[in-house]
Amino acid sequence: MRVEKVTSKQNDSSNPEEIDLKPLYARSVVNSLGLGMVNPFLSPYAVELGASSSEMGWFQSLSNLSNNVMQVIWGGLSDRFGRRVPFIVLGGVITAVLWLPMIFVANATQLIFLIAIQALLGSMATPAWTALIGDLVPSLKLGRTSAAINLWASIGSLIATLISGAVMDVVGGTLHQMFFIPFTVAMICGLVSSLVMLRVREKRRKNFSLKRSFTSEIAEIFTHAKKSPDFMRYCMAGATFALFMSISWPLFSITMIKVLKASMLDIALLSVIQMVITIIFQKRFGKLADTIGRKPLLVLFRFSLVTVPLAYAFSPNVYVLMGISTFWGVSMAMGQASMTAYLLDVTPEEQRGRFTAFYNLIIGVTTFIGSLTGGYISDYMIGMFGLVLGLQITYMISMIGRAVGASTYLTLKETLKLEKPAY
C-alpha cells in the first residue's frame, strides 16, 4: 500500500514537519474490517429479534441522535484540548467493547439500548477523526486524500462483510450462534485500530478547559457558524435531504428479510457489490473533486440517492437490488470524494472539531425525526394496506422528499480554489 507524506498546515514553517499518514490508513482499514463484520447485519439482526417498523424507527433514530448530539460536546472538547488522537482512541475502545454484550441480547429493545449507548459514547471519535484529517492534509489534496482513506476503508469493510455473511450462512444454528463470530471479530478489530492511532504525533494547540455547558457550547458554535454562510447553506441542504432520506431507513431490512426473504449472505453480497464499484471509482472521483470541484459531485450524489427507495419498493427479488447496487456504488464514490472535502472547506481551521460536530448534530436531529416518522408511518400504512403496499407507500414519500432535498444542493457555492496543487 503506497502512502504519501504531507506537510501539516499547522506546522507550516521554514522547517516543516513531515506527517506520516500511515497510521490513519491503518486505522481506517482495521476499523472498517470490524465494522464490516457487523454493521450491514445490525438492522436484519433487529428484525430477526422481532422488531416492528416503529421499533426499527427507534433503532435508526436513537443511534443517529445519540451519535450526533454528543459530537458537539466531543468536537468542542477536541478543539479546546487541542488534541484529536485521545478522542479517537477512547471512542474506538468504547465502541469495540460494547460489541460483546450485543451477542447476548434477548430482544430488539435490548439491542436498541446498547446501540444507543455505543453511539453516545463512541461518537467522540467522529469529529476528532474528521478534524485530524483536516489538520494534517493540505486543502488542495483533501479530495484525493479523503478518497484514498475511504478507499482503503471500503476494501477492509468489503472483505469483512463478505466473510461475515459467509460465516453466518455456514454456522447457522440459533441467531446468537450466527452472530457470535462477527461481534467478537468486530471487538478485536476496534481495539487494534484504536491503539494504532497512538503512533500519530500531533501538535497541541490550546489549553484544556471544561468551563462550558452543553447549551453554551451550542450557542458559541452557532454564533461562529452564522458568520460562515457557505457552512450554514451546507447544513440546511444536508438537513433537508437527511430528513426525507431517513424516512426509508427503518424499512430496508424489513423488505430484505420479510418481503424478499434474503439470507445473511444475500445481504452481504448486496453490500459487497456496491463497495466493489465504489472502490473502483473512488480514486477517479477524488481527483475530480480536486479539479472540477466538490459541488458537481455533491449534486449528482444526492440526486442518485432518490432511486434507492424506488428500487426497494418495487424490486421483485434481491438479485435485482444487487444489479442496481452497482449504480449506487458509483454514486457513493462521488459522495465519499466530495462530502468531507466540502465540509472541511467551509469550516475554519481552528474550529473544525466544533463545526463538524455541529453539522453532525443537525443531521442527527433530522434523521432522528425522519426515522421515527418513517417507522410510524410504515406501521400505520401496513396496518391499513398490508405489508408490501404499506412499505411501498412509505418508500414513495421518502423518494419525493429526497428529490426535494437533493435540489437544495444546487444552491451551494463551489469551494475549490482554482489553483493547481504542487507535486
Image (spheres, rainbow, N blue to C red):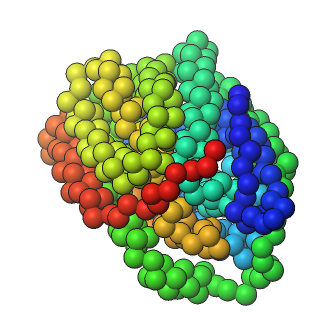
Q: Is residue 404 left or right of residue 302?
A: left
Name the residue located 36 percent from the left edge and 28 percent from the top edge: 325
Q: Quadrant of the N terminus?
A: top right
Residue 70: x percent and y percent? 59, 67
Q: Residue at x 65, y 32 (%)?
A: 33
Relative to 121, is 276 above or below? above
Q: Residue at x 44, y 82 (%)?
A: 226
Q: Is residue 172 above or below residue 16?
A: above
**Is residue 147 shown to the viewer in this render?**
yes
Q: Is residue 365 in view from this perspective? A: no
Percent position of residue 17, x then y: 82, 57
Q: Identify the residue at horizontal 48%, vertical 48% (top origin).
A: 290
What is the count of numbered marks? Answer: 0
In which quadrant is the C terminus drawn? top right
- Between 333 and 9, the residue placed more toward the observer is 9
Residue 65: percent from the left, percent from the top?
49, 62
User: Residue 158, percent across and down?
Assistant: 56, 27
